[in-house]
Image: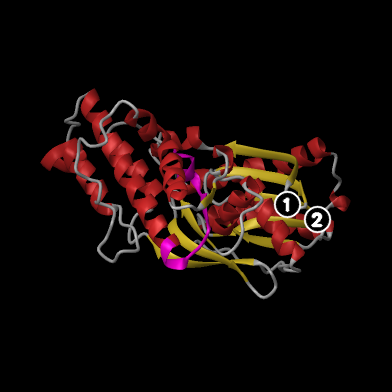
Amino acid sequence: MTESLILSLESSCDETAGSIMRNGREVLAQFVASQVDMHRAYGGVVPEVACRAHMECLLPGVDALLSESGVAPADLDAVAVTHRPGLIGALLVGVSAAKALALAWEKPLIGVDHVEAHVAAAGLAEPELSTPHVALVVSGGHTNLYLVDRDAGGVERMAVIAHTLDDAAGEAFDKAAKLLGLGFPGGPVIERTARTGDPSAYAWKNACLPKDGANFSFSGLKTAVLYAARGKAGRKGPLLLDGKGVADAAASFQAAVVHALVSRTMDAARRHGVNWLALGGGVAANGSLRKELAAAAEAAGLRLAVPPPGLCTDNAIMVGARAHALFAAGIRDGLDLETAAR
């Protein structure tokens, strides 16, 4: 078994994160600097604000990691960093820092795909997770189903088998919360509000299921929330719902999204004949989604790997887990490593 001690950085969106991990599982030190409070005033993530915050947090965070872990740069086997997908400016901050550290410390550089890291987080939660399996990655930027298998070198590879035709589910949560006057970020506030609402108040259950039988679509549901909340006046109109109405709309919205995610995931599992499912991404922290997918998997005789909520949102532990797998397979990147928004 390949041994590794890797420092990993994550800056793809609005969390600055770092970790030092041994063998992709043992966390010696980690930090996450959230920017939620900075972006709340704008009702969403502002890329320029995110980039500046990453610049302020990354190197002090690295110093803290080294101090907390007692690891010296000379002890490290590699420096890893998320290089795609995400906000391009935010990615550039993290990748530039990682390149500088790798060059200064004379260490190999490993570029990590953010979505693949989310799938790796599921493996951390359930060490018995095997391939092939179907993985649902659902967040503010992604709503995809993947078939995860191993290549000839034993490295897990992901093939997209379904995707959203428009908005990602997390983005739809944010937009629905804004229309309902609930604030930002949308996922947690929709979930809290939905607890007192009636999920059958609005007939939106199949609104996220396009007729192609495989993919997702959330723009129609977003429009349904708009009309329910603001009427014909649209986005600029006043909120027409009282407290109970808002709770009912939130519950119905959440139920529709969860129904689509669970039903499409189970359909994919049946088509591909897998025994395991994996769940990852920020929306994977949603309690209703976790409960419904677990129940569906159990009923179908499938096993499910779900990270704890703290590993669903962006973090560098998942980056370190994926980096170890790449390191063990002999995969390295040069200082010409590029970033990609998609």
Q: How are the residues colored?
A: secondary structure
Query: Residue 181, labelled with which disc?
Result: none
User: Label 2 amino acid?
Assistant: Ser
State the image coordinates of residue 52 (x, y, percent, origin top left). Answer: 57, 44
- Judge by depth and name the residue closer to the eye, 141 or 2: 2
Label pair 1/2, CB-CB below 8 angstroms: yes
Residues shaded magenta:
270-286
Is residue 275 on the magenta stretch?
yes
Of marks 1 and 2, which one's residue comes earlier in the chain?
2
Task: Give residue 271's quadrant in the image.
Answer: bottom left
- Judge by depth and name the residue closer to the eye, 177 or 306: 306
User: Label 1 amino acid?
Assistant: Gly
Please identify the residue farthest to the bottom as the structure is shown. 152
Query: Residue 4, labelled with which disc?
Result: 2
Q: Which residue is mark 1?
A: 24
Residue 92 shows up from this direction: yes
Q: Is 244 displayed left or right of 68 in the figure? A: left
State the image coordinates of residue 297 (x, y, percent, origin top left). Answer: 46, 49
Residue at x 54%, y 55% (from the top left corner):
89
Task: Give residue 337's quadrant in the image.
Answer: bottom right
> Callout 2: helix, strand or loop?
loop
Total labels drawn: 2
State the image coordinates of residue 148 (x, y, percent, origin top left). Answer: 55, 64
Mark 2: few, some, or many residues within 10 Å (few <14, many ≥20)?
some
Q: Is 82 displayed left or right of 192 in the figure? A: right
Q: Is residue 176 above or below residue 147?
A: above
Q: Gap between marks 1 and 2, in whole Å?
A: 7 Å
Residue at x 51%, y 62% (from the top left corner):
274
